[in-house]
Image (cartoon, grey):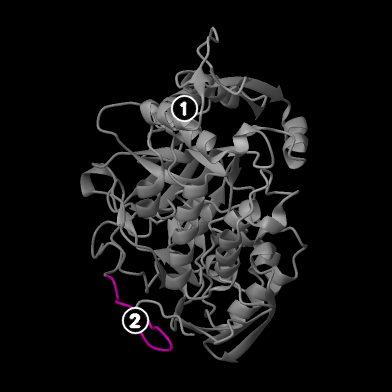
Amino acid sequence: MVLAGLAGGCVAVDPVGQAAGPIPGGELRVALADLPATVDPQLAPGPHLLHRLLFETLLTWGPLAPAGTVASGLALRPHLAAGWMVSPDGRTVDLLLRQAVSFHDGAPLDAAAVRANLERVLALPEGTPARELLADVTAVEATGAHRLRLHLRRANPAIWNALASPLLGMMSPGSWERESWVGTGPYVFGAWEENAVTLYRNEAYAWPPAFYGNDGRAYPQAVTLAVGGDAPAHLWLDGAPEGEGLEFFPVAGRGLLYLAFNLRQGVAAEAAVRRAVAYAVDRAALAAAAEAVEPGWVPAVSPLAPGIWGFDPVVAGAFTPRQSPAAAREILALDGWQHEGEEDGCLVRDGVVLELEVLIQDRPGAVAMAAVLAEQLAAVGMRLRLRVLGPRDALVQASFGRFELLLAGYRWAPDPDVLHYYFHSSRVGTTNRGGYRSSEADRLLDAGRTEMDLELRSLVYSRIQRLLLSDLPWIPLLAEARTVGWDPEGLRGVLLGPAGEIWLHDAWLPGDRH
């Protein structure tokens, strides 16, 4: 099996165009909620914009789209690696590195440098996020000055997300010992103050990808990332003020809130009841309730969060039940549930009242959502009791399957293997808390873990989403999203990656707004 980047053939090579030299363009100011725990990407608990500006990855996800728009399609793209090839058994990945790329200190980016980075990561303690990305890598071999070979314990397509993760940003060998933070990115490290970091333009950045075509425009000569304060900014990643001249756009996240059913027993295990609940749910009203307490949520349409690779909006849009109380009532009536004089209008079948109980954590957002959900179910003849426990107790009860309905959530890495974690039958009794069992789901989830061809793997996860939206072991409720604010007159060329990541490589400042 062969994977290519932007061109066909055994090895994909991305041609590099020489962009015009940077013109002094002033200072780009970015306001954000926090600074990273460390500048060292390989030791960081999670990726940060700072890491993307200083360090670059071997591969990246595309396409990129101008801020405020949505790119169509999803593809793995060359970055520091110009091309790659995978062996037929999926256990060997060969990388062809881009030539004539240097670190900020002038050291060349070659196979020896990349090998030193990856071996450093492999030597980190287990549990370190960067180390976990390479969990299946057994050895790194330099097969030429600019050729590298990764040996894997098993075929694992998660290697593509690993090689595109900012946590595996390349550093000049030895710079981590000096804590000098030397990468290959468009900016170099300047200074770290209490609540701000200043970066300066890498004047030797001679190979920038032609993401936006910013040739000869005014590249910022400095970028300041600041937390809090009242200083004006060009870009707000969190807490953008309301004001004239600002534009706002949502950025997809990798978090999801869902309603899970216990499929082992009780009326929640009945397909008709689950589908009726799905039609009764008004996600927009739930989002409004959550936003009032914990901002950052939009209606969800799939068990995969939109910021996770493999999310298929077409399948999700076609198979996710849309709110229709009439359809919910009709489904229940066909299943034998009728009105028999309950004061609150709750339906009855064979003397049994249609009453459900939802387990939730004692958090303001969850309690607010559950209260709205209870009103929505009452409107179609279902009674919902709230069982509110502390976070630890709720987790224990959920892990043992001691619930009827469960309001919970996840925040995951960019890889769709999260679905294996929650839905494979081998996970029943642990993370498959509702007891969902499906031989077809198991087959697809196993295939998704081993298929190295990204196009085929994408089709596998489209089928998985379609199956889960049909079986409804969960109802996806809300997806994580944050709102980014920017001054479009003062900043141009901001790009968004397919998982919502911010790219400032080709950002520029109009001459009169420096």
396, above or below 14, in the image: above
State which region is magenta: 8-19
Residue 222 left/right relative to 55: left
Residue 222 left/right relative to 256: left
The residue located at (34%, 81%) in the rendering is 7
345, above or below 108, in the image: above
Badge number at residue 286: 1
Give the labeled residue for mark 2. Answer: 7
* Residue in front for this viewpoint, 477 or 62: 477
Residue 505 left/right relative to 303: left
Locate residue 233, reporting x and y percent. Answer: 38, 38
Task: Give the quarter of the figure containing the C terminus.
Answer: top left
Is label 1 in a helix, a strand or a loop? helix
The residue located at (40%, 29%) in the rendering is 330
Locate residue 370, reporting x and y percent. Answer: 56, 24
* Residue in front for this viewpoint, 237 or 383: 383
The residue located at (37%, 41%) in the rendering is 250
Residue 402 seen in this snapshot: yes
Is label 2 in a helix, a strand or a loop? loop
Quadrant in the rendering for residue 403: top right
Quadrant in the rendering for residue 487: top left
The residue located at (52%, 87%) in the rendering is 146
Is 15 contained in the magenta span?
Answer: yes
Magenta-highlighted stretch: main secondary structure?
A: loop
The label nearer to you, 2 versus 1, is 1
Q: Are marks 2 and 1 in contact (CB under 8 Å)?
A: no
Q: Residue furthest bottom?
A: 144
Q: CA distance from mark 2 to mark 1?
A: 44 Å
Q: Amino acid at mark 2?
A: Ala
Residue 203 left/right relative to 335: left
* Residue in front for this viewpoint, 21 or 157: 157
Assess disc 2: are there few (<14), some (14-19) or many (≥20) residues with their C-alpha within 10 Å of its C-alpha. Answer: few
